Image: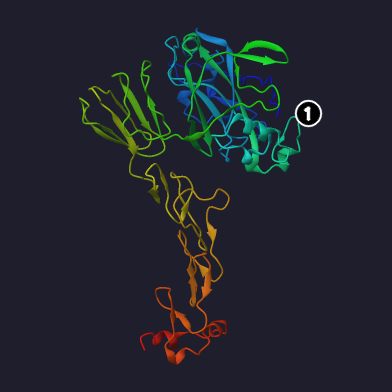
Amino acid sequence: MFAKLSLLFLILRCAVGAATRCTTSPECQCKLANPHGSGNTSVVVPWPISECNMCQLLDINSVCEKETSMDLQTFQFGFWVPYTASVDHSTVSVIKVKTPGGDVKNPQFSIRGFNTPEMQGCGRASFPGASSSDEQKNSWALDTTTTTWSWNNQYVYNVALETSCATNNRIWFYNVHVLASTAEIADKMHFTTEFNVNGVIHVATTTQSLHAVRVSNGGANFTTRALNSIYKISDFPNTLTIRPLLFRIVCSATETRCPAEWSWPIDASFSSNLQKTVTSVLHSIVLTTSTLCDVKFTQTLRIGESFSFNTTGTGCTISIVLGTCTHPHTTTSADNLKCECDKGYYGNSSSCIACSAGKYKLSSGTGNTTNPCSGCPSNSNSLEASAQCTCRTGYKMSSLQTCVLCGSGAYINESGVCKTCPAVYSSFDITAAFESGVTTGGCMAFENF
């Protein structure tokens, strides 16, 4: 379970060309050098280029105004997301300052650190639930029947675990170095943690504050900026729960009640009347003021659109809710919290793909990651984009999604219901007739006999 205690801060040598304004040039895009599984190539951090500037982080940019207040001693955050099975070696995480300090000259570059995780063991699927106690988590860590760690007490790494452990059971720990300004450190500013999970931005439901901690290790006591680091077995990084990012909101530096971006606020109230800006990210959204606001509005934002406003009036609140699902083959989820693919389609809500002929998807949603569409059962078939399969003549669909014969003395009517043949046919073995290729036309013709 031992993490590498001395991970190097990511360094990228940027060759900065001439520019006339403070923007992130291609040479200064934030990149990960040689992340796991990418060979010898560098991978661009998949966030807007306007939010991250590697040259600024490394203080080698002659274009943007030089940051003079950044503390060169970074903070180091350790964390993992055990309740999200789709996180793997390529899942990039960034740490962003929510409200930049007043001494920061380029507040548009909100990303202050980023990294991909390292595999630390096998057993994620059996990790105790979010409400479990530390004692239960420690028991899980020490239970060799459910949990195997990549590092042993002698700091020897178990390479074989990388292939023997099932993909969705692997334990991934993040270690991210974060730059902060003098004012941000003094104010113990909060940072948010975001993840790119299969192309969809997720955000942690809790924030982290900048502060040093007192640590005891091997009888020695010291203060460190390495938060939630691992020194011995049963030590854990911070456990994060993540949710898809629904919208972005930028509040003023003095705002103390800026709403969370991973849930829909129906009555958000604010501590200041200064301007806020909301941007739609994953779905179209609708902003509506309450009747107590001095200036009332209802504003619909399509994906990528932004709207700025201020809230004045005693008791004034804003609701931010899901708008109409605009992508093809999408529908609103049952809880009205998100858009999702229709029945017969799979994928995320921005790109729904039809199930192929011979397959079906019974309910709306993303679909199973491995097999999003199910194959039709025996004696049935389907067209492309089907929510269910159709049984061939003489068979009916059972509650178990299988096609079965009606049996002796019965037939299938046009509604797919088994009906008893008229008395004159009751002794005729219909099952045997089907198996021998005999049709039920005569029986069906006399349904009302």
Which residue does the image show at 72% across and 33% down from the upper left? 150
Q: In the rendered view, would you say 447 is above or below 331? A: below
Near mark 1 (Cα within 10 A), the count class, few <14, some 14-19 or many ≥20, is few
Q: In the rendered view, would you say 303 is above or below 184? A: below
Residue 251, percent from left and from top: 36, 21
Label 1 amino acid?
Val
Q: Residue furthest bottom?
A: 424
Task: Look at the numbered disc 1 and give the secondary structure of its residue.
Answer: loop
Q: Nearer the viewer, residue 246 or 305?
A: 246
Q: Nearer the viewer, residue 53 or 285?
A: 285
Which residue does the image show at 44% across and 34% down from the upper left? 245
Residue 259, percent from left and from top: 38, 27
Q: Which image quadrant: the C terminus? A: bottom left
157 left or right of 48 in image = right
19 left or right of 137 in image = left
Residue 157, percent from left and from top: 76, 30
Q: Looking at the image, what colour scheme do you see?
A: rainbow
175 left or right of 263 in image = right
Q: Nearer the viewer, residue 375 or 185?
A: 185
Q: Is residue 41 visible?
A: no
Residue highlighted by disc 1 = 156
Residue 407, percent from left and from top: 52, 80
Q: Which image quadrant: the N terminus? A: top right
Which residue does the image show at 57% across and 15% down from the upper left? 58
Q: In the rendered view, would you say 175 is above or below 131? A: above
Q: Is residue 162 visible?
A: yes
The part of the image, by quadrant, that contains residue 442 is bottom left
